[in-house]
Amino acid sequence: MELGTLVQLTTGLTLLTCLLAVIGVHSYATGRAQRQALVERLALEAGRGSAPGRRRYFRGLDRRLRRTRLGRLLELRLASTGLDVTPGEFFAAMLTAVAALWLIGQATLAPFFGPIAGLLGIWAAWQFLNWQRQKRIEKFINQLPELARILANATQAGLALRTAIGMAAEELEAPAGEELSRVADQLAMGAAMDDALGELADRLPSRELVVLVTTLVLSSRAGGQVVGALRNLTETLEERKETRREIRTQLSQVSMTSYAVPVMGVGSLFLMNGVKDGALDRMTGSPVGQACVIIAFALYAVGFVLIRRLSRIDV
C-alpha cells in the first residue's frame, strides 16, 4: 500500500470518527435536554391542576432546590396543598417576605427586631402551607361520603374497582377529582391498588380517608361485600361530617383567641414605641432587655401552641 493511499485512508477514518463523535455528543445532549424538560413538566404540572402555558419563574433555583432534602419536602407539601406554585417560586417568595419583614421590623421598631421579624416570616410561610393543606384535606373529607356513594353504585352495577375510581374522578370536583385522577393514572400505568391508595392517604392524611382506603384495599385483596361495606361507610362518613362541622363551630372562638394573643403582643410593641419614641432601642440595647424580649416571644409562642392543642378535638 502506497504512503499516499495510507495517509488518505487514515485521514478518512479520522474524519469519520470525529463525525460519529459529534453525532453521538449531539444525540446525547438532545436526549438529555428532552428528558430534563419532561421531568420538569411532570414535576410542575402533575397533580397540581396547573394552567397550561403559565410561565414559570426561577427555573434554575427550582432545579437546584429539588435536588436537596428541603426542596423535596417542600415539593411534597406544595403537592398536598394543590397550589399552582413550584418550590423555587415559593422559596423565592418566602425569601422576599423574610427580607421585607426584616427591614420593616428593623426600621419601625429596633434593629434587634429585624432577625425576629425574619424568623416570623419563615414561620408564617410554613403556617400558610399548613393552612392550605388542612383546608384541602377538610374539603376532601366533605367529599368522601359522595365518593363512597359513587363507588358503591359503580361496584353494584358490576364495574371493577379500578373503573369505579376512574368514574368517580370524572364526576367529582376538586380536590377529590384531581386526587382520584392521579390514582387512576397510577393504576393505568400498572401500579398496585395498595400503593396508589396508600400515596393518596399520605398526601391527604385523615382518619376518614384511612378507613375508606383500608376498606377498598381489603376488598380488592380478599373480595367480599364491597357494596354493603361502602353503603355503611357512607352513612358513617355523613355522621362524622356533621359532627366535625358542629365541633368546628363550637371551637371557632377558641381558634381566634389563639391568633389574637400573639397579635396583641406584637401590637403592644408598636404601642410602646409610639408612646415614647426610641423606647425599644433603649430596651434592646442591653443583654437583659434582649433576653426579656426573647422570653416574652417564647411565652407568646407557647401560649399559642397550648391554646391550639387544648382546642383540638379528634373525632
Image: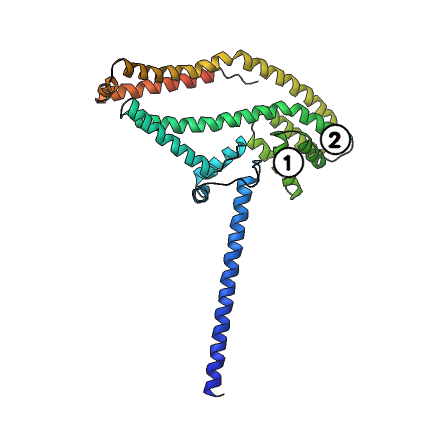
Q: Amino acid at mark 1?
A: Ser
Q: Amino acid at mark 2?
A: Ala
- What x and y, as percent, mark residue 156? 77, 29
How packed is label 2: few (under 14 Cα within 10 Å), some, or many (20 or more)? some
Measure how far apart labels 1 and 2 are at the Cα level.
16 Å
**Towards the viewer: 155 or 150:** 150
Q: Quadrant of residue 185?
A: top right
- What x and y, as percent, mark residue 103? 32, 28
**Towards the viewer: 25 or 231:** 25
Which of the colour schemes (rainbow, by chain, secondary structure, one colour) is used? rainbow
Residue that label 1 marks: 181
- 171 on left or right of 158: left
Q: Residue at x 36, y 29 (%)?
A: 100
Earlier sequence position, callout 1 versus callout 2? 2
Q: Quadrant of residue 106?
A: top left
> Which numbered tag is attached to residue 154?
2
Report helix, strand or loop for mark 2.
helix
- What x and y, as percent, mark residue 129? 48, 29
In this rendering, the label closer to the viewer, 1 or 2: 1
